[in-house]
Amino acid sequence: MPYENELAAAKKAASLAARLCQKVQRELLRSDVQSKSDKSPVTVADYGSQALVSFVLERELHPEAFSLVAEEDSGDLLKEESLETLHRITKHVNETLISDGSYGVSPLSAEDVAVAIDKGKSEGGPHGRHWVLDPIDGTKGFLRGDQYAIALALLDEGKVVLGVLACPNLPLTPLGSNHEQTSDEIMGCLFSAKIGHGTELQPLDGSSSVKVRVSATENPEEASFFESFEAAHSLHDLSSSIAKKLGVKAPPVRIDSQAKYGALSRGDGAIYLRFPHKGYREKIWDHAAGCIVVTEAGGVVTDAAGKALDFSKGRFLDLDTGIIVTNQKLMPSLLKAVRESIEEKAD
Ligand code: AMP
Ligand code: MG
């Protein structure tokens, strides 16, 4: 079966990275108010997650060499003032590997960790295979104790062929506009998709998986929509105008990270609108995994002009303003509402 081993490796890598991030986030949320404004926990989790994913891919794909396009590199970490952070990262990586027990390795050194992180310097492109990683997508959400995701995808000849999204804080039960989190909810979702084989959702604790599908609604009045929690990442006024034009009644569901793609893939909402401020360039690791998770669940992901996203151009996506996501039936009217709202805004 094509990409079967690769998908298993990706799920293992993202699950272990999620375990590390959860531990760091728990420590962060337990800490006092003053240290909550400190950004170092997210740094530790971000680099630790990237090191773990790189290490697991190396082990699982051995002896095949692999190319990894990832958000971080170790440059800043190797500076004198960051060595303590590098040691904290190394400790978390080793503790996670020991808690899993699959790899009978002697503890990694700080240098091993820096080397694993720097495997992520690939530029990607249209030829061959490239893994694409966001070690913590939604760092702002991570710091707030909200949603974040570990997003890992594989490109083959410029196309996304598999993707996994580990969302440690996403409840297993659907989110809605009136979703109020309760303390007894089971959290932690692992979405995975392989080209031509659909999308699955599994609890992050490893129990059995179910197939998921996007919402089948044709009626915008029943469709709720997702957007970024952070107003700096997406124009909330533009999405509100689009939603109104389309006839969406529900208020926006604002959450961080590619957890939006995951939630949409199981039909929690029917639309995701993303309109960054002028001049922002989207990175491939912010969309590759989310995109296949949604498309394999029956959804459509395009730019604001209705064109499919092109992941073959290197580290950046080259696109017309904005990314929109919905099901096949709603896409034509959504595109029309997007076009009209953008024109009105330009007037
Ligand atoms: P979200 O969780 O939807 O707010 O998106 C999080 C992602 O937005 C991060 O991983 C960043 O890579 C990306 N990002 C950072 N700055 C911006 C920006 N100014 N506009 C849009 N996206 C951004
Ligand atoms: Mg990101």
Image (tube, grey):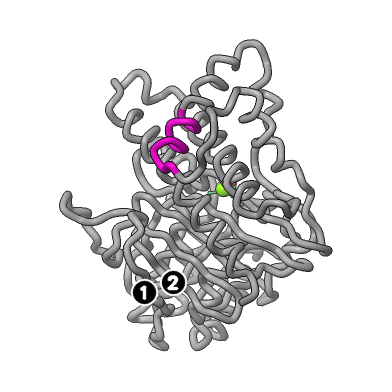
Q: Which residue is mark 1?
A: 210
| Rendered view: 135 above or below 287 | above
Element under disc 1: strand
Work out how far the residue at label 2 is from the one at label 1, CA to CA, in angstroms: 5 Å
- The C terminus sits in image quarter: bottom right
Tell me if I can see residue 279 in this picture.
no
**Is 279 positioned to the left or the right of 18 in the image?**
right
Q: Main secondary structure of the magenta part?
A: helix
**Is 139 positioned to the left or the right of 54 in the image?**
left
Q: Which is more N-terminal, label 1 or label 2? A: 2
User: Label 1: how many residues lie within 10 Å, few (<14), some (14-19) or many (20+)?
Assistant: few
- The N terminus sits in image quarter: bottom right
Name the quadrant containing residue 336: bottom right
Residue found at x 55% / y 40%: 52
Residue 98, magenta (yes or no): yes
| Rendered view: 21 above or below 291 | above
| Rendered view: 187 above or below 173 | above
Residue found at x 36% / y 61%: 253
Element under disc 2: strand
Q: Are the residues at dot 2 and dot 1 in contact (C-beta closer than 8 Å)? A: yes
Towards the viewer: 100 or 180: 100
Magenta-highlighted residues: 92-101
- Callout 2 amino acid: Glu
Residue 200 - label: 2
User: Label 2: how many residues lie within 10 Å, few (<14), some (14-19) or many (20+)?
Assistant: many
- Callout 1 amino acid: Val
Residue 55, magenta (yes or no): no
Q: At which x and y percent is residue 109?
A: 59, 24
